[in-house]
Image (tube, rainbow, N blue to C red):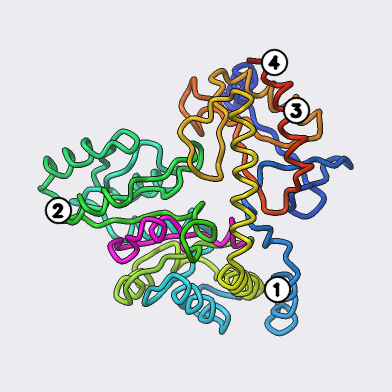
Amino acid sequence: MKFISEELKELEQSGLYRRLRTITSNQESHVTIGGKDYTSFSSNNYLGLANHPKVKEAAIEAIKLYGCGAGASRLIVGTMELHTKLEERIAQFEGKPAAILFCSGYVANVGVITSLVGKGDAIILDHINHASIVDAARLSGARLLIYPHKDMDRLEAILKRYTQYKRRLIVTDAVFSMDGDLAPIPQIVELAKKYDAMVMVDEAHATGIFGESGRGICEHFKVSNKVDIIMGTLSKSVGNLGGFVVGSQDLISYLQNKARSFIYTTALPPAVCAASIAAFDIIEGDPELREKFWEKVGLVRDGLKKIGFDLMNTDSHIMPILVGNEKTVMEMSRYLYENGILVPGIRYPTVAKGTARLRLTVMVTHTRKDITKLLSVCEEVKKIFL
């Protein structure tokens, strides 16, 4: 298999080779790598709940009572008491009739999309939707139709033109994970209603932090009752592992019977379910946590703009610093790392060629000292590399 070593060499030469860094501490605002401390502006643990005492305690108690693994898939003997309780808790939190759990957000998207559309149907995507949505669309066998990023005129043109399909499903990220901007959900649901299409929104990066109650972008735009399928994850603001979908009872029953990535995989560990229930209790019961989070986001965003970075069109907690050149962005990321700050360089194929960027995220547990240090080193990066 000579082609493997040849392609790896090409990746290295083009600045696209990826290496893993092993963290030997918890997933906090400060992490330990190779025995050294780094301030991490990379984690999706936005609200710090992966390390919250109540969340950890819930997981420990669940292990004592239920053990470690679920033992089987949900439709065999894998549905344990905590799976049912977590689904009920999620449905209550989201204000929907029912919920279904998946083992990750990725497999949630794969399971839902491949269940709802297939040959003879059409799936309509934003150009920069998450890879899990794109992969699911390809696997489904449905006709794949793509509109330019947030271009509602093109979306309407597609809906007008392609009327021959039995089912048409529009799928969009809520917060676009590499650009940080928000999908125009109100316009999408209006067009879907006008042209008789279904709408699915991936709230992965919005659950827990957007909206009055932390339900996400659909709540933020006050259109939750107009969206057919809402998907979210437990692995970001909730601080755990897994994905979920909420909607009508019929939708959830349908997915229980049709979603292959639900049917043919072992259920989530009980400890994850217990920890997630505790996390939702905190999100719902402590709105000040979100307020503090957005305060930290504002400090970082304003500071980066003052330095003169191009943050693209972000209006969320995800802040991309557009660089362009792949090698340059990795040199910038390396400089930050050498100065004790962990910020990833994002390159092709995660983003389009020529749009490489640094991608910053903030945690509520970042201190003002952490933020001051970040902005100070970023000033140096700007002078040296741009």
Q: Where residue 190 sits: x, y (%)?
A: 21, 53
Q: Nearer the viewer, mark 3 or mark 1?
A: 3
Report which residue position mark 2 lands on. 194
Most foreground residue, 27 or 272: 27
Report which residue position mark 4 lands on. 383
Q: Secondary structure at mark 4?
A: helix
Q: Where residue 376 sits: x, y (%)?
A: 75, 29
- At a point 81% along the width and 34% down the height, the residue shown is 340
Q: Amino acid at mark 2?
A: Lys
Report which residue position mark 1 lands on. 59
Mark 2–mark 1 distance (CA, rounded to whole Å): 46 Å
For residue 204, above or below residue 92? above
User: In the visual, does 1 lie left or right of 129?
Assistant: right
Magenta-drawn segment: 215-238
Most foreground residue, 224 or 139: 224
User: Is 378 part of what is drawn in magenta?
Assistant: no
Crowd band around label 2 with a 10 angstrom C-alpha radius: few (<14), some (14–19), many (20+) = few
Most foreground residue, 251 or 151: 151
Crowd band around label 1 with a 10 angstrom C-alpha radius: few (<14), some (14–19), many (20+) = many
- Image mark for residue 126: none
* Mark with earlier residue (2, 1): 1
Report which residue position mark 3 lands on. 377
Mark 1–mark 4 distance (CA, rounded to whole Å): 46 Å
Q: Secondary structure at mark 2?
A: helix
Q: Is residue 250 visible?
A: yes
Q: Where residue 108 sits: x, y (%)?
A: 45, 59
